[in-house]
Amino acid sequence: MEETLFFAAALGALGGAIGVVAQRNPFYGVLALIVHLFSLAVLFLLLSSAFVAAAQVVVYAGAVMVLYVFVVAYVGGDEESAFDPIPGQRLLTPLLGAALFVELSIAVLGSSLLALGGDGPEVAAGFGDPAAIGKLLLERFLLAFEAASILLLLAAVGAVVLAGKRAEVGSGPSGRHSPGVPAGPDPTSAERTPGGTAGSSPGHSAPQARPGEVPAVPPAGGSA
Amino acid sequence: MSTEWYIVLSSLLFAVGATGILTRRSPIVILLCLELMLNAGNLALVAFSRMLGNQDGQIFAIVVMVVAACEVVIGLGLIVAIYRRRLPLDVDELRELRG
């Protein structure tokens, strides 16, 4: 039973990975990656790590893949051309990948890890469940947990700065404040706008057409 | 199943992801192949964690997931910024680093 599940999930993971690499259309590549991630979650369950499997399904196959699908739909999934900038690139890279696989396998299997051939020790019933992982995260790995939270916060702020509407207005930092903020370009208004977006936007009755732009601009201006 | 199988599968998936990064030219697909490689690393971490009967490897896998999510967010933000500036979404044409 365990072997059957392992080989089915391994086939799914490998097929999804090859689908990501071989599909011309990025949209189908994203769908193949979702298959790959679900198969990996099955493998994680077989390795008796329930929490990582659940996080894989919820975080990756749920949230991250939705982000990918949105961006592919926004950018437009153009199929890339078959033109090779380097001659023979499409023939040489699978050879390089095969060489990498052989090298990794030799490096791991040729090492003197004695337990590598076995199933691993018998583990207790609570191995890898959310309670055990949460206890580890909040006690022994608390520093890594906090660092991960700061990293996520920085990534969110960075994404707002990168993908904000700054590039389209394009005439400098004062030009994009002028339609929404009537107070003029003195520094007090620049300080007031990030904190007072919720309170100041009902005050402007005239720019009803662009309430979507007004909250998007002050974080980009405040952190740039 | 013995741990060898998981490790061999992990290195195979890593090699497939590396092949994709070397072959493809769309930045979105390159990010997808990066995900493949990170997930291969995750699989190896969880397999070794099971082999040792120690849950620390699973914490490592979760931290790798967090880092992958941050990388995806920044990468997709860059792709949206590139698209807004009407630049081609092709890493061979974006090699000059000029805005």
Image (cartoon, coloured by chain):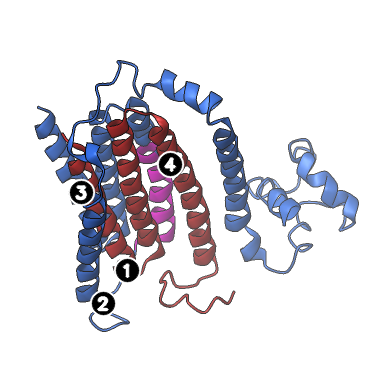
Is most of the magenta stretch helix, strand or loop? helix
Can residue A16 be seen in this snapshot? no
| Structural distance between the alpha carbons of marks 4 and 1 | 23 Å
In this rendering, is residue A209 above or below B81? above
| Structural distance between the alpha carbons of marks 3 and 1 | 21 Å
Residue type at numbered disc 1 = Leu
Rendered image quadrant of residue A18 = bottom left
Residue type at numbered disc 2 = Gln
Residue position marked by numbered label 1 in the rendering: B22
Rendered image quadrant of residue B1 = top left
> Which chain is the one coloured red?
B
Q: Residue at x 48, y 52 (%)?
A: B71
The hue used for chain A is blue
Can residue A15 be seen in this snapshot? yes
Residue type at numbered disc 3 = Val
Mark 3 or mark 1: which comes first in sequence?
A: 3
Task: Tell me which segment is drawn in magenta.
Answer: A60-77
Residue type at numbered disc 4 = Met
Mark 3 or mark 4: which comes first in sequence?
A: 3
Q: Chain of mark 4?
A: B
Residue position marked by numbered label 4 in the rendering: B65
